[in-house]
Amino acid sequence: MARLSALQELVELVPPPVAPQGAPFDWPAAESALGTALPSDYKAFCDAYGHGTFFNGWLWAPHTPHAPSGDGDLLSSYWLDILADVETEYRPYPEPGGVLPFLTSELNYLFAWRTVGPSDSWPVLVQTDGSDWHHFERTATGMLLSALRDQLFDPPQRESDLEVTFASACTRPAAPAEPFVLRGHGYISSEGHYVTLDLAGALGGSRRAQLDELLAALEPADRARIVRATAKRSGEVLHVRGKRDIDPLQRAVQDWANRRAGWPPR
């Protein structure tokens, strides 16, 4: 008897929706946008399930072309930008042999292809908790199947007789929403207090242009709170004079973003 493919086993484990959201996908356009062919097993998987997430006690979110959320869009640079801004042994695609993320999970796992050789032979890397990378000579669909069965690592983390479900993602146009540009704040002993932003993600345009526009628009008292402003690939960072500057600066930045986006709608 012929061995079932990983996709066939996945379909037996959790049937795909009758009308998968967004599928079938325009793969020639997607591959042209990325500048590379993609593994055939993953394209077949996406066409079978469409936009959505799996749940086996933990949430697993495969990336699909033009997904409703930016961090789940296979064509987005969201995860590539984050990888570009951190020190890691693997660099993001399109650098030679770079990693191209295709799946994230509630466990803070990041699954990515290492883009070496033909796409159907790409190995899979799994980054656990934002640090260690684990190498697998398996397909993306096979990795997802193992994750849903809790058999990703040896020995398995839990019993494999789990109930697994799939929920299609809503693709209805999103209602107007306030442009949340504040990501958080923190402190590094060598650099002091800082505020992290996502101006370009919320407002569009380039990070440098949005940051320059913000700095030019701030009141002098708020501008004076900033020691240094940096536009990175994954976001914008405002280094401030002290902890007491964080709250008023965040309010000023959000107020500017609301005016910039015309929020609330009139």
Image (cartoon, helix red, strand yellow):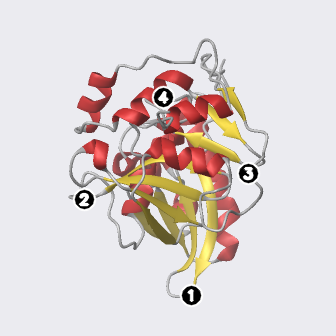
Amino acid type, callout 2: Gly
At a point 56% along the width and 87% down the height, the residue shown is 189
Which sits earlier in the primary sequence, circle 4 or circle 3?
Answer: 4
Labels 1, 2: front one: 2
Instruction: Work out whether residue 231 can be spotted.
Output: no
Q: Secondary structure at mark 4?
A: helix
- Position in image of residue 180 (x %, y %): 62, 42
Amino acid type, callout 4: Cys
Disc 4 to disc 2, how far (Cα)? 24 Å
Q: Residue 46, which numbered label?
A: 4
At a point 31% along the width and 37% down the height, the residue shown is 38
Labels 1, 4: front one: 4
What residue is pinned by disc 2? 97
Cβ atoms under marks 1 and 2 closer than 8 Å: no
Disc 3 to disc 1, how far (Cα)? 45 Å
Amino acid type, callout 3: Ser
Disc 3 to disc 2, how far (Cα)? 34 Å
At a point 49% along the width and 41% down the height, the residue shown is 141
Disc 4 to disc 3, how far (Cα)? 24 Å
